[in-house]
Image (spheres, helix red, strand yellow):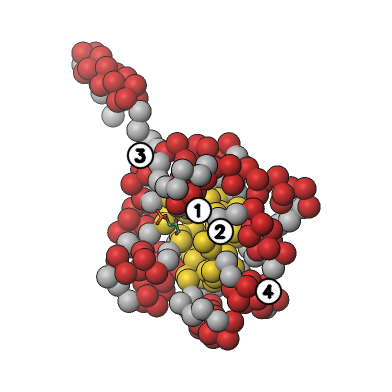
Amino acid sequence: MKFFVDTAVIDDIRELNDYGLLDGVTTNPSLIAKSGRDFKEVIAEICKLVDGPVSAEVAAMNFDGMVAEGEYLAKIADNVVIKLPLTLEGLKACRHFTGKGIKTNVTLCFSANQALLAAKAGATYISPFIGRLDDLSIDGMELIHEIREIYDNYGFGTNILAASIRSANHVKEAALAGADVATIPPGVIKGLANHVLTEKGLDQFAKDWAATGQSIL
Ligand code: G3P
């Protein structure tokens, strides 16, 4: 499963990229607002930093507006992916960009039927939101299982990008469900490395090593 980081904070992206843990980046209008940065500038900066796909979301609600904005954003860098809402207008725009060889990420997906439509529109990525379904006491991960089954039934090439990931358990469950990608907040990605027994074992090794009085170099 590929790891995208779900943030517009450059320092976090740089840190994870330096660890070699990043396959791409996703942003959305809320993350841009939180970063306090200029949208187009920050997308250009991220695209220089990361080789993989970088999702930049349109703000328009209608087809013409989405096409105009998406075409502008696609010119920022070769690795820009145009993020479009899962509406009929967004799906039409998705078909338009797919026809032009521009990659798309159809976002705000909350049902298997919506994911089926996105695949039929030729989306590169579909973003089902796990955490926001869990917030409503609906099993978000079940949606990933359903989409995986439907896409496999028909050989759709659209990548399942598990979004609205809130915890390490979400990451594990998305991987078990066969998501192609998970987009994850920076803190959750770093937290995946933690285990109390790793820390305990390392403490013991450090003490025992010191007792040998040896040095490797
Ligand atoms: O980028 C979309 C998604 O990951 C947002 O997550 O936590 O705001 O539901 P969240």
User: How dense is the environment of label 1, judged by Cα within 10 Å: few (below 14), some, or many (20 and up)?
Assistant: many
Amino acid identity at mark 4: Arg
| Camera-nearest label, 4 or 3 | 4
Chain-order first, disc 4 or disc 1: 4
Residue that badge 3 annotates = 191
User: 189 or 213, which is in the foreground?
Assistant: 189
Asked if residue 76 is positioned above or below residue 15 in the image, the reply reads below
Is ligand 1 closer than 8 angstroms to the Cβ of mark 4?
Answer: no
Is ligand 1 closer than 8 angstroms to the Cβ of mark 1?
Answer: yes
Q: Are marks 4 and 3 in contact (CB under 8 Å)?
A: no
Tell me the number on the disc at residue 25. Answer: none
- Give the residue displayed 48% in from the left and 75% down from the top: 58
Chain-order first, disc 1 or disc 2: 2
Residue that badge 4 annotates = 95
Is ligand 1 closer than 8 angstroms to the Cβ of mark 2?
Answer: no
Chain-order first, disc 1 or disc 3: 1
Amino acid identity at mark 2: Cys
Q: Taking 17 as reference, is 112 left or right? A: right
x, y percentage for residue 94?
63, 72
Q: Are marks 1 and 2 in contact (CB under 8 Å)?
A: yes
Residue 86 visible? The answer is yes
Residue 165 visible? The answer is no
User: How dense is the environment of label 2, judged by Cα within 10 Å: few (below 14), some, or many (20 and up)?
Assistant: many
